[in-house]
């Protein structure tokens, strides 16, 4: 019986170790003073257009979650494609009043709008201990952002990048059409003006002819 118990415990520990390894493999874990900090995406795979968040998990030297870091003390910037976001505050997900959330977890929500590698720059303090690290997505850190097409079923929805490209290609055509319409409108207005002038001249000439005819009759 004891052997069976030990075997079950060993299997359980192995499963737990595999589970933890699977979770931490998608994050970068570093030590800052007495604290261990894991950094990565909240949801992986990370997809374009899907709500996600930068996830930070903080524990002390004994492995106890640290869930009382003020949002003003720790922040993260996100960079990709030559652009960098403003500093995003990291808010604790756990609520001691309701017991909801994960102790020691902090998130900064964002929606990736372009595929590719993303860089997280975490900076600030944890209870006075300075934290400063920069990590870019890779096979050994956290996932790059992917296009959603591979995960869509049954219909493929155009990505924001595709839609933006189509709009950019349409802009010159729309401008040309507007310009042509303006030119046509101007030409029509000019034609109407010329017609009105010619018509007015014709009326004046007609009146002049009538006047001359009446004078001719009187003279006769």
Image (cartoon, rainbow, N blue to C red):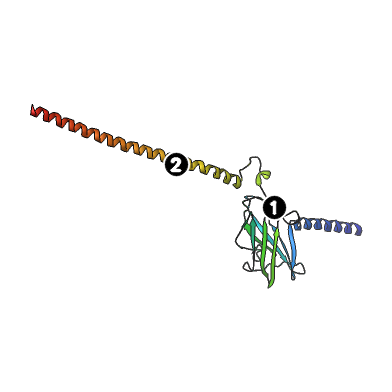
Tag shown at residue 179: 2
Query: Observer-nearest residue: 99 or 196?
Result: 196
Tag shown at residue 144: 1
Is 129 located above or below residue 205 in the figure? below
Quarter of the image where the C terminus is located: top left
In the visual, does 220 lie left or right of 104? left
Residue 29 in sight in this render: yes
x and y percentages locating residue 210 in the rendered image: 16, 30
Residue, far bottom = 128
Tally of numbered discs: 2
Q: Are there few (<14), some (14-19), or many (20+) residues within 10 Å of tag 2?
A: few
Query: Observer-nearest residue: 77 or 181?
Result: 181
x and y percentages locating residue 204 in the rendered image: 21, 34
Q: Identify the image quadrant of residue 42.
A: bottom right
Tag 1, which secondary structure? loop
x and y percentages locating residue 109 in the rendered image: 63, 58
Q: Residue at x 40, y 38 (%)?
A: 184
Q: Residue at x 48, y 43 (%)?
A: 175
Q: Are there few (<14), some (14-19), or many (20+) residues within 10 Å of tag 1?
A: many
Q: Residue at x 69, y 68 (%)?
A: 131
């Amino acid at each position: 019986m004891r052997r069976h118990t030990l075997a079950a415990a060993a299997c359980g520990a192995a499963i737990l170790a595999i589970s933890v390894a699977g979770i931490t493999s998608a994050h970068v874990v570093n030590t800052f003073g007495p604290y261990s900090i894991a950094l990565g995406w909240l949801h992986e795979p990370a997809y374009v257009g899907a709500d996600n968040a930068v996830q930070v998990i903080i524990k002390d030297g004994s492995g106890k979650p640290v869930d009382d870091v003020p949002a003003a003390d720790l922040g993260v910037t996100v960079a990709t494609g030559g652009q960098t976001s403003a500093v995003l505050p990291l808010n604790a997900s756990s609520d001691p009043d309701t017991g909801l959330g994960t102790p020691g977890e902090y998130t900064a929500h964002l929606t990736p709008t372009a595929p590719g590698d993303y860089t997280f720059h975490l900076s600030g303090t944890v209870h006075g201990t300075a934290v400063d690290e920069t990590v870019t997505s890779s096979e050994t850190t956290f996932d790059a952002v992917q296009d959603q097409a591979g995960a869509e079923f049954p219909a493929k929805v155009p990505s924001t990048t595709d839609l933006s490209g189509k709009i950019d290609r349409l802009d010159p055509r729309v401008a040309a059409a507007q310009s042509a319409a303006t030119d046509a409108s101007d030409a029509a207005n000019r034609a109407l003006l010329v017609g009105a002038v010619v018509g007015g001249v014709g009326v004046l000439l007609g009146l002049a002819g009538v006047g001359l005819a009446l004078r001719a009759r009187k003279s006769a």
